[in-house]
Amino acid sequence: LLLNRQKMDSNTSLDWPQVLNYNGTYKYLHLEGNVSYVDFYLHQPLVAAVFITSYLLIFLLCMVGNGGVCFIILWSKHMRTVTNLFILNLAVSDLLVGVFCMPTTLLDNIIAGWPFGSLVCKMSGMVQGISVSASVFTLVAIAVDRFRSIVHPFKQKLSIPTAVVIIAVIWILAVAIMCPSAVLLQVQEEKHFRVLLGSGNATRPVFWCREEWPDPGMRKIYTTVLFANIYLAPLSLIVVMYARISISLSHTATPGAGKRSQEQRHSVWKRKQKVIKMLTVVTLLFTLSWLPLWTLMLLSDYASLSDLQLQLINIYIYPFAHWLAFFNSSINPIIYGFCNKNFRRGFQAVFQLQLCSRAACSQPGPSNGSDFHIMTFPSQ
């Protein structure tokens, strides 16, 4: 799994009986034959409740926000522009992140072992990796589209068919980069541990859904490839594109500035500053949302951490890093959609069509449907 592959692999390499009694979070028992028991639930009820509540909040935000973006763009023909197609694709990939990544990752963070079968292991891992990759690649496509529109406004605009081809390439690349993970994902039994079920003596084996690499060095190489292609390269492209856009806006003279009043020139300047601030926010959110998780994944593979350090990371820091990465998928529809005035108008128009009676909605609105499209920037 892209989001917790190192976490699960590192769990199985720990000497759990030596490191799991530092705060009473786990209960375990040594038995003959070097077998230990662990609790089914990994955390005390209060900690688990915090995890569940926080994940539930971003799950609902992800479903409502991205679902709303999909509904608005698909409902109105006037919303089907090139930029909107990329935003629609972003919303679809983020919805997949919400459906397939958030529940399984939350479950992995609060219970011991993998509760599902081998098929779910492979399918869940594949869909998780593909959806995250597609979401990140789409953010790059949006940045490139904005770059072309602002820095090179006289170049030929992307057409709808071209945008569809780009979206298809995004998904093909996402599938291709996650194929090794899907092939190597397996459900394996942890022979030295068993899970306590309830207060009785009932137990069951501990199973993990993890990548089984023939050589640990190959796993490190694959982790590096994922980091370079799903975080480092996209982030670099986004930073370069938005930096060029900001520079271009800063140096663009206001047309007819000599004839405009001071207030009008100030208004144009404020709009430019707002766009630049929005681009900065977008870049920082992407950077900060994914940096902790990728840092942990690289540390799990390359750093020589003690068992106690690994266990503290796995039990407490990984869940927060996962939550932060998922938060990016939940906040994307607000950044790229609902922060835009014209997009909000489109939402209001669709909402009125759905809820108002024909008589109540027969009066003409303040603007027609052709105004309802996502502009190049959220601030426009």
Image (tube, rainbow, N blue to C red):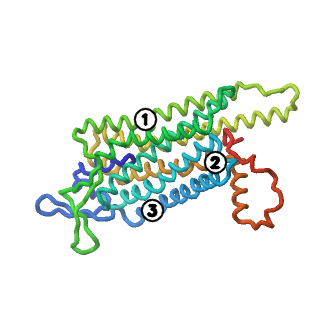
Q: Quadrant of the C terminus?
A: top right
Callout 1 environment at 10 Å: few (<14), some (14 to 19), or many (20+)?
Answer: some
Callout 3 environment at 10 Å: few (<14), some (14 to 19), or many (20+)?
Answer: some
Name the mark on residue 18.
Answer: none
Using the image as rendered, state which of residue 303 and residue 265 is in the foreground: 265
N-term mark: 1 or 3: 3
- Nearer to us: label 2 or label 3: 2
N-term mark: 2 or 1: 1
* Residue found at the very far left of the displayed protein: 33
Mark 1 vs mark 3, CA separation in Å: 31 Å
Left/right placement of residue 249 relative to residue 132 reads right
Identified by mark 1, the residue type is: Asn
Identified by mark 3, the residue type is: Ile
Q: Is residue 259 above or below residue 358?
A: above
Q: Residue at x 75, y 36 (%)?
A: 270
Residue 107 rendering spot, x and y as whole percentages = 38, 60
Identified by mark 2, the residue type is: Gly
Q: Quadrant of residue 284?
A: top right
- Nearer to us: label 1 or label 3: 1
Give the residue number, with chain letter if any, for mark 1: 229
Q: Is residue 256 above or below residue 47?
A: above
Secondary-structure class at tag 1:
helix
Give the residue number, with chain letter if any, for mark 2: 337
N-term mark: 2 or 3: 3
Give the residue number, with chain letter if any, for mark 3: 52
